[in-house]
Image (spheres, rainbow, N blue to C red):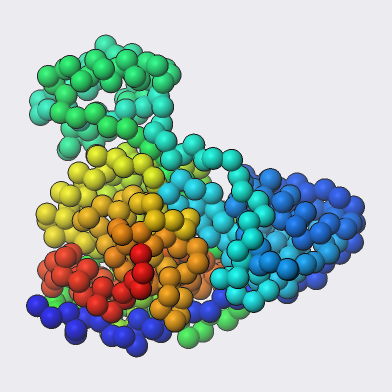
Amino acid sequence: MSLGRYFNRRVIASLFVGALSVVTPIADAADSLTWRKDKNSVDADVNSWSLIQTLEKIGEATGWEIYLEPGTKRNVSTTFKNRPRDKALDFLLGDLGRVLLPQTNGQPARLLVFRSTQKDATLLVSKPKEDPTTKPIPNELVVTLKPGESIDELAKKLGAKVTGRNDALNTYRLEFENAEAAKAARADLAQNPAVESIDNNYNVRRPETGDNMGLLNPAGINLDPVAPTCASGSGPTIGLIDAAVQKTGAAYDALMLPSVNVAGEPLSSATVPAHGTGMAQAILQAVSQKQQKTEWRVRPYNVYGPNEQANTFDVANGISRAIADGANPINMSLGTGGDSSFLHRVIQNGHKQGIVFVGAAGNEPTTAPTYPGAYPEVIAVTAGNADGTVASYANRGDFVDVLAPGQVRITFNGQTWVTTGTSVSTALVSGIAAGSVNGGCVTGDQLRAGLQSLMRVPSK
């Protein structure tokens, strides 16, 4: 089957948008920086810091990995109190360009600071210590039982708590008192005939939100949903595995189905868009490119709840629920370095049912695999520049399938934000994919081939 009619080169090219910078006045004062990440609030009292010193202080306070365009200088002198993160960066960095790349693959967020373009931010200023989230959660196991077996009795014998359940797949998340107890339980479970498999659980970091671009006019963004090109009737549900999606006060709200809270009620903010909010809008912006109407909807599956991190068990549960609800395609703008056999098995089961999965490649940049994007059943997406090259921050390993724009504007409470990274690229590809998978138009493998023909990765 030819995929030519499902894709339009002009549509894909039109998704590429340029980076923005903001000029904000600064003030005078003394020398301190207080960064309260839990409250999205920053105080500064700086008399005369160099740009390098300022970025080092920001790195210490946030845990971000920070890169600077070589030769860039700035004398920082400013005073402010109780400013949100993005406004604080405006005061500290002035008219310098910046891009904050979200956390993926268990790695810290990356701040790029530059005079010209983000490609020029190559000087490492601040690198945090090794992030432990790439390693298994030491006191947890994910256990799959054979049909008819009871997890509750088994957990009681092992001295474990059952903190997560997927009864449909006979798979359970167990928490032990410590790592030693988990290790001993693994050895015991390996000999138990009731056990089908034993897996590790891995943390998945909560991605950063985008940068606030102020009160800009978002005119020109077409929010009209589009019709599938090879099926009639109501449009599909696009599954979004991510953080919670907030009400935006814009036309997007009407296109969102009620959220499924896989890991508990979400943390919410009235001033900052969640990562899931940005990804939902990116998906719908890509969908809208075809300029035709139908009943397209996005259903969010919140796998973070109120927590700073998700984990591969909850991500797998979110995907399992999305499959059961009939979502197709399923967007996964998140990642971890941990290869979870349970997560992979859930995706394999969905793939056999014709579900198309789209996953982020990661923002390290390395060639190391990011899961779930690296699984062969997933279309792995990296971020590209307008000239078709891979973005300087984006992963490009052999597991990467296609390249897509890495930046998008989103709206929240009447303001426009810009968010950057392979998370955005993934969401845009999911939006493009949605018009083709509805009604079984193409399989995931056919879709991958069609996307690769138009959105090639120039080098890996």
Task: Give residue 397's position: percent from left, percent from top.
Answer: 35, 59
Residue visible at 13% across and 60% down in the picture: 354
The C terminus appears in which quarter of the rendering?
bottom left
Q: Is residue 236 visible?
A: yes
Q: Is residue 358 depicted above or below 303 in this figure?
A: below
The N terminus appears in which quarter of the rendering?
bottom left
In this figure, what is the number of numbered marks? 0
Q: Is residue 61 depicted above or below 407 in this figure?
A: above
Q: Can residue 271 be seen in this view?
A: no
Residue visible at 36% across and 27% down in the picture: 140
Task: Give residue 436's position: percent from left, percent from top.
Answer: 20, 74
Residue visible at 73% across and 65% down in the picture: 93
- Outermost residue, bottom side: 10
Residue visible at 35% across and 73% down in the picture: 458
Which of the two residues, 36 or 404, is positioned nearer the viewer here? 404
Task: Give residue 77's position: percent from left, percent from top.
Answer: 86, 61
- Outermost residue, top side: 157
Q: In this view, does 417 lie to the left or right of 347?
A: right
Q: Is residue 203 depicted above or below 112 in this figure?
A: above
Task: Give residue 434's position: percent from left, percent from top.
Answer: 25, 70
Which of the two residues, 110 or 246, is positioned nearer the viewer here? 110
Q: Is residue 369 depicted above or below 25 in this figure?
A: above
Q: Is residue 278 left or right of residue 77?
A: left
